[in-house]
Image (cartoon, rainbow, N blue to C red):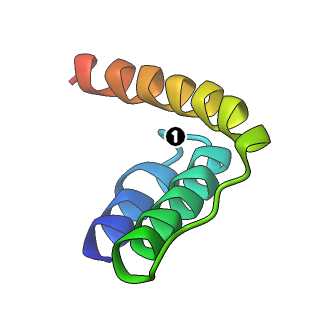
Amino acid sequence: MAQKVYFIKRFILKGLIDKKFGFLYDHLLAKRFEADYENFALIDEKEVPEYLKSVKKFILKVKEIVSSK
């Protein structure tokens, strides 16, 4: 969970990344932990296209931040 705290402090609280991406990150990280440590994780097939769309925007924003440094 250290990476989650770092992400929030470094990017969300400083306003570099919109809070909506923080919620997305939190949700998908929780799903990842669920998949790793539970028997299985459920993701509604209908939600996947929206996740992909949001993750692509998130990646573009991170690339923009990294390339500006």
Q: Decide if residue 4 is on the left or right side of residue 20.
A: left
Q: Which residue is found at the position 42% from the left and 63% from the top?
A: 32
**Numbered circles on residues, count:** 1
Q: On the rendered image, what quadrant is the C terminus found in?
A: top left
Q: Position of residue 59 (x, y in %)?
A: 42, 27
Residue sitting nearer the eye, 31 or 11: 31
Q: On the rendered image, what quadrant is the N terminus found in?
A: bottom left
Which residue, given by chain and number where applicable, does mark 1 sit on?
17
Q: Is residue 55 above or below residue 67?
A: below
The residue sitting at the left extreme is: 69
Residue sitting nearer the eye, 54 or 34: 34
Q: Position of residue 47 (x, y in %)?
A: 74, 42
Q: Which residue is found at the position 28% from the left and 66% from the top?
A: 3
Residue type, numbered disc 1:
Ile
Quadrant housing residue 35? bottom left
Q: Is residue 21 above or below residue 25?
A: above
Residue sitting nearer the eye, 47 or 29: 47
Q: Which residue is found at the position 25% from the left and 17% from the top?
A: 67
Q: Is residue 55 above or below residue 19?
A: above
Q: Secondary structure at mark 1?
A: loop
The residue sitting at the front extreme is: 39
Q: Residues within 10 Å of mark 1 (few under 14, many from 20)?
A: some
